[in-house]
Amino acid sequence: MKPDVKPARPYFSSGPCSKRPGYSLDNLRTDVLGRSHRSAIGKEVLKNTIEKSKELLGLPEGYKLGIVPASDTGAVEMILWSVLGAKPVDVCYWESFGKGWMADITKELKLDNVNKLEADYGQLPDLTQVNPDHDVVFTWNGTTSGVKVDNADWISDDRTGLTICDATSAVFAMEMPWEKLDVVTYSWQKVLGGEGAHGVLILSPKAVERLESFTPDRPLPKIFRLTKGGKLIDGIFTGATINTPSMLCVADYADALDWVESEGGVAGTIKRSEANAAALAEFVDSKDWIHFLAKDEKVRSNTSVCLTLDLDADKVKQMVSLLGKEGVAYDIGAYRDAPAGLRIWCGATVDTADIKALTPWLEWAYNEVK
């Protein structure tokens, strides 16, 4: 039978993600719109947003956070082009975005001393093989595979290399061991449901030291330049952005940060995400036709939950389309490079009640197309 109750908010896309509960454009600060981002009010809003991000995330003393162009991709590319080449590089990947960073490092930067640690979708490579004297590039959460790093024990406290972590679908939804991470990137369009086009770059003092002591033998586009005259451009981390940001997107992000604070901070948003993932897991574990792509529960993502079905790829597409037409779940097909299946976002801005309302529809749609 077709279920009677639909999710109140059928937005389960893995990016851009669902807006926060209670979201309204009326809540956004608009007095900065139409003003220069370099005006006093523009700089104030940007600086306050940066400082509130650092406070909520609990960054260690000396860590810097800046708003940069081109979403998480821009933040990652900026740091890869700026710091890699000083040391050998270990690249760990188990899904499409990590594989993309590997391609950029070897085919675009054309670095020679690169080691890859790879695993198939649904698995993690052996991270203990990372050399602490090498730079390491990895994603904390594989958005397209539903696999996350479950701990940072494999990162040495005595490392001489930099740890460069793409954490776009992890920050604000998973515990981040900041002292182990020298560079962290994210975009607020993921766990916070913000608007796209802007990335966030976090640097440890060790990363700043690398930037100020290493000059890459390659040209850097203006939007990648983090230093001038051998010194960090500190303004990037106090509100003087590299290029013109959308102040409407910044206002949207600020609203999301206020919501995080109202939920009890990062601990509260982590709790929301874990509750969503648990509700979905309860359903999956009770059925024999739907399965987690990540078999090992310890490394299973609590944000981008990836599932396989006892259906061929065309039937899966029909099921995804049917759920969209019913207004039950939008944009939940697996990533184009991943195995055929579903990818259901369980981040903090999703309500657990909507996950629970979705699950009977998954079973109905499965039976309809089967």
Image (cartoon, helix red, strand yellow):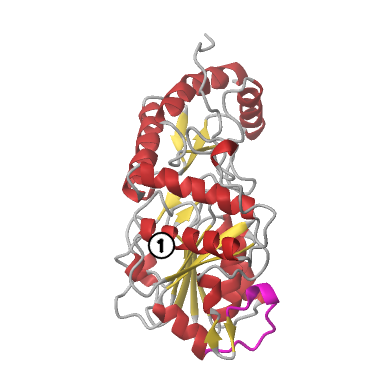
Q: Position of residue 196 (x, y in %)?
A: 62, 51
Q: Residues within 10 Å of mark 1 (few under 14, many from 20)?
A: some
The stretch of residues the image draws in magenta is 214-226
Classify residue 40 as left or right of residue 173.
right
223 inside magenta stretch: yes
Identify which residue is drawn at 55% across, 28% down. Answer: 10
Residue nearest the viewer, comparing 63 with 361: 63
Q: Position of residue 126 (x, y in %)?
A: 39, 64
To which residue does mark 1 refer?
54
Q: Amino acid at mark 1?
A: Lys
Residue nearest the viewer, comparing 66 with 162: 66
Give above or below for 289 relative to 254: above
Q: Position of residue 231 (x, y in %)?
A: 53, 87
Q: Position of residue 98 (x, y in %)?
A: 54, 61
Q: Main secondary structure of the magenta part?
A: loop
Classify residue 84 as left or right of residue 271.
right
Identify which residue is drawn at 50% across, 56% down. Answer: 168
Viewport quadrant of the C terminus: top right
Helix, strand or loop under label 1: helix
